[in-house]
Image (cartoon, rainbow, N blue to C red):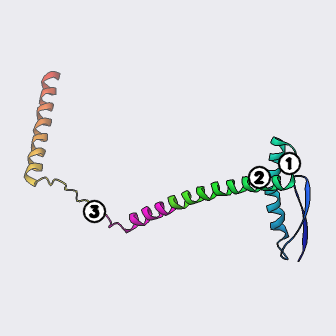
């Protein structure tokens, strides 16, 4: 079992870990060291046990906050997924029927006759004005 030296709050500690876990131990120690340094900057020098306890509690508090945020995000994701599934399972809307008025041939013919008469009257009016 490898032994790794980690530094927490400027103090070295020898810790044993499983083979291949050294990187994870160093990473975790880095988090604890950051909290310990923050404590030391605020309070000053602390006894080793108190520094480790306080730094551990600060990390645990951050972890609890992260878990709560993660739970809220997971709930929101589940809600969104349920909404998407509901939308996908809805029946397709029926095609709208659009009614287009059909103009009977008699009306078209009558309009054409009226247009021809109007043109004839306009031509006659122009001839009278010109002559």
In-front residue for pair 95/66: 66
Quadrant of the image containing the C terminus = top left
Check residue 3 in the rendering and tell me which mark sits there, or answer none.
none
Is 91 one of the magenta-colored residues?
Answer: yes
Check residue 95 in the rendering and tell me which mark sits there, or answer none.
3
33 with respect to 66 (left or right): right
**What residue span does the magenta drawing correspond to?**
77-92
Q: Could you give the CA–CA distance between mark 1 and mark 3, rounded to whole angstroms? A: 75 Å
Judge whether residue 131 can be spotted in this image.
no
18 with respect to 115 (left or right): right
The mark that comes first in sequence, 2 or 1, is 1
Check disc 2 and report its element: helix, strand or loop: helix
Residue 128 position within the rendered picture, expressed as x and y whole percent measured from the top left: 12, 24
87 with respect to 56 (left or right): left
Residue 108 position within the rendered picture, expressed as x and y whole percent measured from the top left: 12, 49
What is the count of numbered marks?
3
Residue 84 position within the rendered picture, expressed as x and y whole percent measured from the top left: 44, 63
Q: Nearer the viewer, mark 3 or mark 2?
A: 2
The quarter of the picture where residue 83 lies is: bottom left
Residue beneath the point at 19% across and 54% down: 100
Check disc 1 and report its element: helix, strand or loop: loop
Contact between labelled residues 1 and 2, with CB atoms less than 8 Å apart: yes
């Amino acid at each position: 079992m490898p032994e790794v030296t980690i530094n927490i709050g400027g103090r070295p500690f020898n810790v044993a870990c499983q083979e291949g876990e050294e990187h994870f131990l160093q990473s975790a120690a880095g988090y604890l060291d950051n909290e310990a340094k923050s404590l030391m900057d605020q309070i000053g020098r602390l006894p080793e046990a108190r520094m480790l306890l306080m730094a551990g509690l600060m990390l645990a508090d951050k972890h609890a906050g992260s878990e709560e945020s993660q739970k809220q995000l997971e709930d929101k994701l589940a809600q969104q997924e349920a909404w998407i599934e509901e939308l996908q399972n809805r029946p397709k809307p029926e095609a709208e029927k659009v009614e287009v008025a059909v103009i009977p041939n008699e009306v078209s013919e009558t309009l054409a006759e009226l247009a021809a008469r109007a043109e004839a009257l306009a031509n006659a009016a122009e001839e009278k004005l010109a002559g």
